[in-house]
Image (spheres, rainbow, N blue to C red):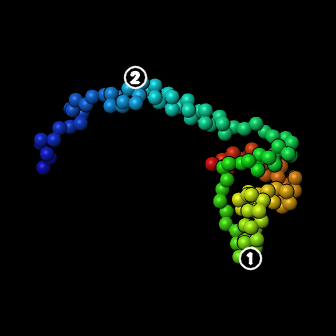
Amino acid sequence: MANRKRVSISEKNIPNPATYDSLFKNEDSTQRIENADKKEERESSKDVQKKLHRFEDIKAYYLNFDRKKQISTYMPRALQIKLKSKAAAENMTLSQFLLNLILSQGLTDQEIKEAYQYEIDHPEINK
């Protein structure tokens, strides 16, 4: 019951798909693949960071960290309102305010250094 009018894809004369691409029509597909590989290497090399040693540098690193993960915290509504208003008074978001509070009063210097060392040893946790 095969459709006899249908032509196999191997028998069709299909032009080179690279000619369809008007944006990169002078580049062949292997060159585009090589460029994509180079871009991927550059991005992965950005993830490799220089290890920081001074506590002030580590604290600044966490204050300026851009790949943050979301967590949920549960507390009385009145405390949430107070925290949000205090953060707004200091021209910060609630996340920035809490991070600053944790780094300055919630964790000891040694605990922050240990967290940083863990991050260096396990870079996959930030992906």
Eye-nearest disc, 1 or 2: 1
Q: Residue furthest top?
A: 26
What secondary structure is marked by label 2? loop
Question: Is residue 93 left or right of 24 when viewed as pictured?
Answer: right
Pick whichever, 52 or 5, lies toward us.
52
Q: Quadrant of residue 9?
A: top left
The kind of residue tagged 1 is Ala
Question: Is residue 100 left or right of 29 when viewed as pictured?
Answer: right
Question: Is residue 11 left or right of 62 when viewed as pictured?
Answer: left
Pick whichever, 78 or 102, lies toward us.
78
The tag on residue 115 is none
For mark 2, what is the residue? 26
Which residue is found at the position 86% from the left and 42% from the top? Answer: 54
What secondary structure is marked by label 1? helix
User: In the image, is residue 79 above or below residue 95?
Assistant: below
* x and y, in percent, of residue 95 in the image: 71, 59
Crowd tier of the residue under label 1, counting other residues whose Cα lies within 10 Å: few below 14, some 14–19, many 20 or above: few
For mark 1, what is the residue? 78
* x and y, in percent, of residue 66 in the image: 68, 48
Label 2 near label 1: C-beta < 8 Å? no
Pick whichever, 65 or 116, lies toward us.
65
Q: Is residue 91 visible?
A: yes
Which residue is found at the position 42% from the left and 24% from the top? Answer: 27
* x and y, in percent, of residue 21 in the image: 36, 31
Crowd tier of the residue under label 2, counting other residues whose Cα lies within 10 Å: few below 14, some 14–19, many 20 or above: few
Q: Quadrant of residue 20?
A: top left
Question: Is residue 11 left or right of 16 when viewed as pictured?
Answer: left
* x and y, in percent, of residue 119 in the image: 74, 48
Q: Quadrant of residue 71?
A: bottom right
Q: CA distance from mark 1 to mark 2?
A: 63 Å
